[in-house]
Image: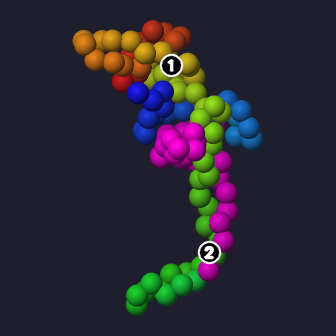
Amino acid sequence: MNRIKKGDTVEVIAGDDLGARGEVLRLLLGENRVVISGVNMVIKHQSSQQAGRAQVQGGRVQMEAPVHLSNVMVVCPDCSQASRVSFGEVDGRKVRICRKCGEAID
């Protein structure tokens, strides 16, 4: 079970976007990275191409770049604080638990 899942709200704890919060869009587990909405924005230059009959306009496109997993912490939905995650059992299933308030995150 992963400490961070798609759809979680996370806070950046290191780097240029220190303190920024956002929702997890994608997990790149092979690279130990995560893509967060509105965080670590980069500009990608695209050329115009023909896609069938419709023309796709080129230009500069802003997109989110991946952030390393060690630079983010899960935000607990109950106490609204960035917290470490532990694991425990609730009703016979394994859940993630906030280390600050002790409530289940899942």
Pick the front one: 78 or 74: 74
Residue 85 seen:
yes
Q: Is residue 4 left or right of residue 33?
A: left
Q: Is residue 62 above or below residue 91?
A: below
Under mark 2, the amino acid is Gln
Q: Position of residue 80 (x, y in %)?
A: 51, 22
- Binning the other alpha carbons within 10 Å of mark 1 as few (below 14), some (14 to 19) or many (20 upward) gives many
Q: Position of residue 59 (x, y in %)?
A: 63, 76
Query: Is residue 36 within the magenta segment?
Result: yes
Q: Residue furthest left?
A: 91
Q: Residue at x 57, y 44 (%)?
A: 31
Under mark 1, the amino acid is Val
Query: Is residue 43 within the magenta segment?
Result: yes
Instruction: Quickly name the residue at label 1.
Output: 85
Q: Main secondary structure of the magenta part?
A: strand
Q: Residue furthest right?
A: 16
Q: Is residue 25 above or below residue 95?
A: below
Q: Is residue 97 above or below residue 38?
A: above
Q: Position of residue 22 (x, y in %)?
A: 54, 39
Q: Quadrant of residue 69?
A: top right
Pick the front one: 102 or 3: 3
Q: Is residue 44 above or below residue 52?
A: above
Q: Position of residue 72 (x, y in %)?
A: 61, 32
Q: Quadrant of residue 1?
A: top left
Q: Residue at x 61, y 67 (%)?
A: 61
- Binning the other alpha carbons within 10 Å of mark 2 as few (below 14), some (14 to 19) or many (20 upward) gives few
Q: Is residue 27 left or right of residue 45?
A: left
Instruction: Quickly name the residue at label 2.
Output: 46
Q: Residue at x 49, y 87 (%)?
A: 50
Q: Magenta stretch?
A: 20-47
Q: Residue at x 33, y 18 (%)?
A: 94
